[in-house]
Amino acid sequence: MEKVVTRIPPSPTGHLHIGTARTALYNFLFARKHKGDFIMRSEDTDRARSTLAFEEEIREGLTWLSLTTDSFSRQSERAAIYRSYLEKIINEDKAYISKEESKSNPGESIEVVRLRNPNIPLTFADEVRGDITFDTTELGDFVIARSLDDALYHFAVVVDDFEMGVTHVIRGEDHISNTPRQILIQEAIGAPRPYYAHLPLILALDRSKMSKRHGAVALYQYRDTGFFPQAILNYLALLGWNPGTPQEIFSLPELIEAFDVAKIQKAGAVFDIEKLKWFNKEWFKIVPQSDIEPTLRAALKKTFDISTPDERVVKNLIHLIRDRSTVLSDITKDVEEGEYDFAFKAPVLDPALIKWKKDETAKDALPRLHEVITRLTGATDSDNPEAIKSILWDYAEKVGKGEVLWPLRVSLTGKEKSPDPFTVIATLGIPEALRRIQNACDTIEAS
């Protein structure tokens, strides 16, 4: 096989969306698997809408996803190249300058460049959909440039792909209708035909085309919400591609190894935010602690003086937060809602809250709390919630889970909702847990 070159050619007229990110991913995976190049071309010929800010956002987004490119170019800087090709095919009578009335300004005469269409049936092979045939007669002699210095999209794309040695065009299926025009231009300028693979569209849950009304579609929104780039890549890879195995969690190197264009599906791929959250939760377990801890500590510092408690408590709490969170933004939300107050201050207890459903008063819970104290006293301090659970679970099953665990939870946290008491004890440590349970007993007896 010749050296593989793929490309991602976004128009910098808007944010980097999920669909473009997936297209970039597939092009990247194919190029890297075949030891080829993956290039980025900013198709900024729409001068009115293109901005450097959007271009930079797109480049930053691809970098955040680790989709590194081997070269970068802008179409706005290549007008002289397009002109040379236009002049060449005009001289060869494969295109011509046409004087006609402006559509935008009736009565005004303009000159455009039109391709001489040979009006032939045209068939091209698509790696995903097989052979596709068009009758190009209906296209007529279509416009390829507004002037010699203002090439239109189709012409610029073909020239760029030829000049840059692009061998495989992997793009969304909404570009299928563009392909016959581009092939006719390829034949006019003497460019070889690349391999084509048209990807299924990404659909919303109602199977309509994904749009803003279905929620966040720009990549930066997922990044700012706290999704990991590894999770996004993992999920996007499986939106339209099936590895043919039960494996769901893939690192980028694993995706490169497994990717096969032949396994791209034809049917539209449904984007499910809940499934993406599942992938992110799985990656929460995989991403190194050192990569996450600064973010977790920063979220805690907004509310707490995290230098006050034992550092061991903070580290245990960070492990707890990591296990409970789906996206990084959950952490700030849970901290603000008081989910982790228990780690930084002993609760101010309301005895009435300690009472379980069947208890007449809070004092009915005292024997059960005393038994918990007895069982925990002398136990080896453990950071493992399962070890704590093993100490208390048989008693809770014998007496009643609610009867034991409800007053225990309230004694430790002062709240109706919190992490389970075994996790709280493991986070605080047994000595601090015992102090709080005894304080609850003293408070009940004094009430």
Image (tube, grey):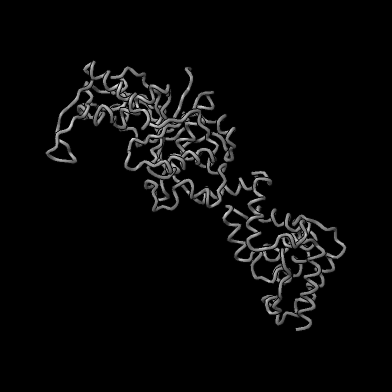
- Could you tell me which residue is drawn at 59 percent across and 37 percent down? 251
Is residue 292 visible to us here? yes
Residue placed most toward the observer, 429 or 282: 429
Total label count? 0
Residue 397, x across and y down, in percent:
74, 65
Residue 319, x across and y down, in percent:
70, 53
Q: Is residue 96 depicted above or below 241 in this figure?
A: above
Name the side, left or right, on which 326 lies relative to 78: right
Name the side, left or right, on which 347 lies relative to 62: right
Q: Quadrant of residue 16?
A: top left
- Could you tell me which residue is drawn at 73 percent across and 54 percent down? 315
- Could you tell me which residue is drawn at 72 percent across and 62 percent down? 424
Residue 119, x across and y down, in percent:
21, 23
Q: Quadrant of residue 340?
A: bottom right
Is residue 269 visible to us here? no
Q: Is residue 421 depicted above or below 270 in this figure?
A: below
Residue 260, x across and y down, in percent:
50, 29
Q: Is residue 418 depicted above or below 28 in this figure?
A: below
Q: Residue furthest top?
A: 92
Q: Looking at the figure, which quarter contains the C terminus? A: bottom right
- Could you tell me which residue is drawn at 82 percent across and 64 percent down? 431
Q: Is residue 56 depicted above or below 340 in this figure?
A: above
Q: Quadrant of residue 198?
A: top left
Residue placed most toward the observer, 413 or 7: 7
